[in-house]
Amino acid sequence: MRKSSTPIRRTLMNMIFLSSGVVLLVTSSAFCAYEFLTFRQSSIQQLQILGRAIASNSTAALAFENAEDAASILTAFKSDPHIVAAALYDIRGKVFATYPQELPLDRLPAQVGKGFSFSRSALIGFEPVAEGPKQLGFLYMESDLNAMYSRMELYALIGALVAALSLSLAFLISRRLQYRLLQPILALADTARAVAERHDYTVRAAPTGAYEFDLFTDTFNQMLTQIQESEDKLQAQVGRLNLLQHITRATGERQDLPSIFQVVLGSLEENLPIDFGCFLLHDPGAKTLSVAALGKKGIRFAESLSLLPNGSVPIDQNGLSRCVGGQLVYEPDVSQVAFPFPQRLSAAGLRSVVFAPLIVESQVFGVLVCARADGQAFSSRECEFLKQLSEHVALASHQARLYGALQQAYDDLRQSQHTVMQQERLRALGQMASGIAHDINNAISPVSLYTESLLEREPNLSERTRNYLTTIQRAIEDVARTVARMREFYRERDAQLTLERVEINRAVEQVVELTKPRWSDLPQARGAMVDLQSFLADPLPNIMGAEHEIRDALTNLIFNAVDAMPTGGTLSVRTRKATVADGETRVLIEVSDTGVGMDEDTRRRCLEPFYTTKGERGTGLGLAMVYGMIQRHSAELEIDSAPGKGTTVRLNFPAVTSSVVSQPKAKSAAVVKRPLRILLVDDDPLLIKSLQDTLQEDGHLVTATHGGHEGIEAFAAAAKRGECFDIVVTDLGMPHVDGRKVATSVKGVSPTTPVVLLTGWGQRLIATNDAPAHVDKVLAKPPRLHELRAALAELVA
Amino acid sequence: MALLRGKRWLLMGVVAGLIATQALGAADAPTENQVQAVFLFNFSRFVEWPPQAFAAPSDPFVIGIVGSDPFGARLDEAVHNEQINGHALIVRRFRSISEVDNCQILFIDRSEIARLGQILAALDHHSTLTVSQADGAAQRGVMIQFATENSRIRLRINVDSARAAGLTISSKLLRPAEIIGTDVKEQ
């Protein structure tokens, strides 16, 4: 409000009073002026008339100088009380007679004047006195103006009364008129004040019945309506902005898609609001959209829409395809759209739908669906809002995905680090195991050689002695096999796979036996019972493969099965033959448990490297290794599992087509009859002694040397003497000069002399044909006498 | 300085004028005869003569004096260049009534009062205003008599005589005058 503003009522009153007052004043002034002028004029006329009469009468008095007569003539002025002085002058300008008679002469003008004139307080005039053409003298008259003044006073009094009356009337009338005129304006002003003070734009000015005011009021009301609409729009806009900010903040605090989707849907349902909302994720390959999240409020629609979590919606030629193309699609009335998905929405009771694309890097990866039960229910601003929101959500989703990927990469990195450490541990353990195996093999070699030699060469042994020796031999064999298996289990992986015939049943039995502590002892220790049942089909065709890999795979499967049954259960291992449609024969191995089973996600991912459900205990490599083995063997892997229903893993190998079931190991019975000159090279005195003894008993000439260096010198010296050795038997692992160097030196001196390598790693070298250069035969420790004889016979013959 | 000097000259002029006026006024103090001469002339204004008083329109308006002339040049001066209704004013002096011929105003000097009856008779049927300063002249038939009262000249008018001569005397003239009837004894 301006400080100096005056209420319109007072202004109007002032205007009316001012205008009336001015009119009255002007009228009165004009009237008075007129009266004044006319009064002066008439005064002059009256005085003139009177003067002329008197002058005419006084001619004779003047002409005949009768002063008394003249004075008596002048008394005629008594008729007019305002004449205060009069005088007759003779032609020479001398005062002849005065009125009143006692008038002092100095009261009269000394000089004779002419005509009439007003002084300050009197009207004075000279009238010539003449008889015919003869000028006789002058008549002087003086009339005071009291008459005029008293008259003017009367006029002023009347004027004041009239003005007061007029103004009172004007006041009364204008008050009455003002009320009619001002009432609508004041009412409007009250309305305006109410609007301004309360900010309530819903009030409206009432119509007044006067045309202009109604026009004015209507305009004012229209203005209010527009302001109210603008206010509402502004409020809605602010509300949406707040909502957007709220959602953006809420999504920013979350890093996984489902919770981002849920918080967005919850906010939209609560605050926009919408009746139904869901997020669909786009699968470009299948041309479908899968339901990623459903709003809680709209779940009843979802049920009648038969849109279930993880359900899918095909993209047909409707709004969805346009939306997947990157556009925001608004269907004001889906009942008018003939395509299936809109019809489903319509059938569920939804009329207006907005599909907002979720776009990241120009790719639509999902769709936000917002629907209301009413038709035409989304304004363009809301569509714009949803578009902006979908951009935010897309960004947040993208970030969540990136965060997820980062987390995944970080987890993978940690897993691989863990695995590397595990493998390092395994490698160290394997190396240690190899060393132990080597030492054991060396240690039992004399036992094995002497036992075999005694049983073979002493016919006079008592039955009891023979039995004991046989038991010792079997025990040594067992020890050797156990050591070999242990070494096999811990050995390093081969780069290349060498396929050989594998007897599956045997491998299964070995694994079952080897893993017994794991499926039998450990569960028992914590009070659980695992019942292992083997159903092995016999006969069963062999397969081509790497037995140790198959064993490892089976071991892993049994470990997994045991881990899946923390409270115990039944572990079944089956082998069987199967014939598929084209007549191909296949060998199946099944490992089943009755454990916790896997859900769909775990089942899908369980073959991934480093994927584990065992936490710290697992490497996530077990099934990955199995899968790698399966691929290398051109085999197939099937997994049947459901949560709570246990898991069955089925390995499916192609069988060997040949009918040969097993290759009998033909033991060479050939024995070298003639004595041979044999050079023994080893760093283990016990082994040298036992080998020397047994070979000398066969009649050979044996020269034993300790260590590679000594062996090479002895061979060179003998060659110099011309007494060359027929064969060299050397240990592989020796300090300073190992078996390979010995073999190289021997071949350098005498290329035709055979070299036999004895090794604690012998079995592996044999299996892989990885014989070092210049070595003609590799034999495993502990050396068997019959193998040694066969080798001698083969190489020297 | 120039203004001051101008004012001084003006002042000197006014003083000189005043002295001259005083001197003239003292020299011009009107005598009774002078006043009567003017009065005689003034009568021509307040009396109406019938048209037959003049034989011809060009006839002069004659103020006659019969007997000795008390006015001298004064009367001549008074009527000099004056006219009454287109008639030039002239003054004629008669030694006796017999000389009188057609005059509009006839002053009968006191010296002729003895022959008043004769004069009036001779003027009978003439429209001649008779004036005299002789005492009792009005009662004896003279139309206007100058009478001196308190050193003032008063008029005594015999209205009947005037009416008989066909003259109309203005009421204005009658007002300051004393109306006198003809004394029958005199006739």
Image (spheres, coloured by chain):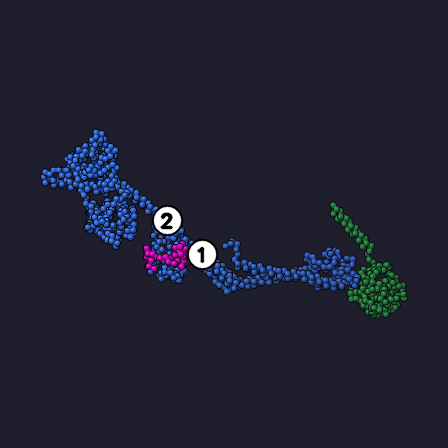
Tell me the chain of label 2: A
Mark 1 and mark 2 on one chain: yes
Q: Secondary structure at mark 2?
A: helix
Kind of residue sitting beneath label 1: Glu
Identify the residue at image location x=75%, y=57%: A112
Q: Residue A623, position in %: x, y?
A: 27, 47
Let me know if residue A142 appears in the view: yes
In the image, A142: left or right of A179?
Answer: right
Residue that numbered label 1 is attached to = A231
Magenta stretch containing residue A310, yes or no? yes
Q: Residue A525, position in %: x, y?
A: 20, 46
As drawn, the chain in green is: B
In the image, A430: left or right of A219?
Answer: left
Identify the residue at image location x=13%, y=39%: A455
As drawn, the chain in blue is: A
Let me know if residue B33 appears in the view: no
The mark closer to the camera, 1 or 2, is 2
Q: Which mark is residue A399?
A: 2
